[in-house]
Amino acid sequence: MGDHVFLKVSPWKGVQRFGKKGKLAPRYIGPFEILERVEEVAYQLALPPALSNVHNVFHISMLRRYIPDPSHVLDYDTVPVQDDLSCEELPARILDRKTQTLRSRTISMVKVQWQYHKPDEATWEREEDIRERYPHLF
């Protein structure tokens, strides 16, 4: 009791998708706190109100242990969050450029470092899209 676990949701793929479809759907959600041990292989979990239509007792095969890691906790003071719990991502700078050649055309790409993200989380974006939305970077 008191430990946290992830809940396996892949068997419910057709019933509840938890925000994403197909192979991008999460396999586990959570972590959730264990309230009590019902039997040797069943546990009762503290589920959020959004999952109130799901029974809260699960077989041990549906659970995966959560090992607490301080890096999983985000510092909410550094990220500006709006009232609807959304955050606007803005590019900080352009790190690199490349051209990608397809069969009949070439596409200019830029590697963008985003604010409030780690340096290794930079993404490749189309240069014309970034130039149109954020002309101050060029």
Image (cartoon, rainbow, N blue to C red):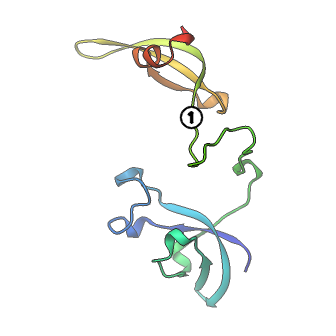
Three-letter amino acid code of the residue under disc 1: Glu
Q: Left or right: where does residue 120 sit relative to residue 8?
A: right
Image coordinates for residue 27, horizontal then vertical, percent: 47, 60
Q: Secondary structure at mark 1?
A: loop
Q: Outermost residue toward the top?
A: 138
* x, y percent for residue 75: 74, 45
25 is higher (above) or lower (below) than 42: above
Furthest-bottom residue in this view = 39
Q: Residue furthest left?
A: 104
Kindly identify the residue that appears in the image at 41 percent across and 19 percent down. Answer: 129
Q: Quadrant of the image for the N terminus?
A: bottom right
Residue 54 lies left or right of residue 13; in this view the side is right
Residue situated in front as seen by the camera: 11 or 125: 125
Report x, y in % for residue 69: 74, 54
Q: Nearer the viewer, residue 97 or 77?
A: 77
The picture places residue 67, in percent across and down from the top left corner, at 71, 61
The correct choice, above or below, for 53 with respect to 12 in the image is: below
Location of mark 1 (residue): 88
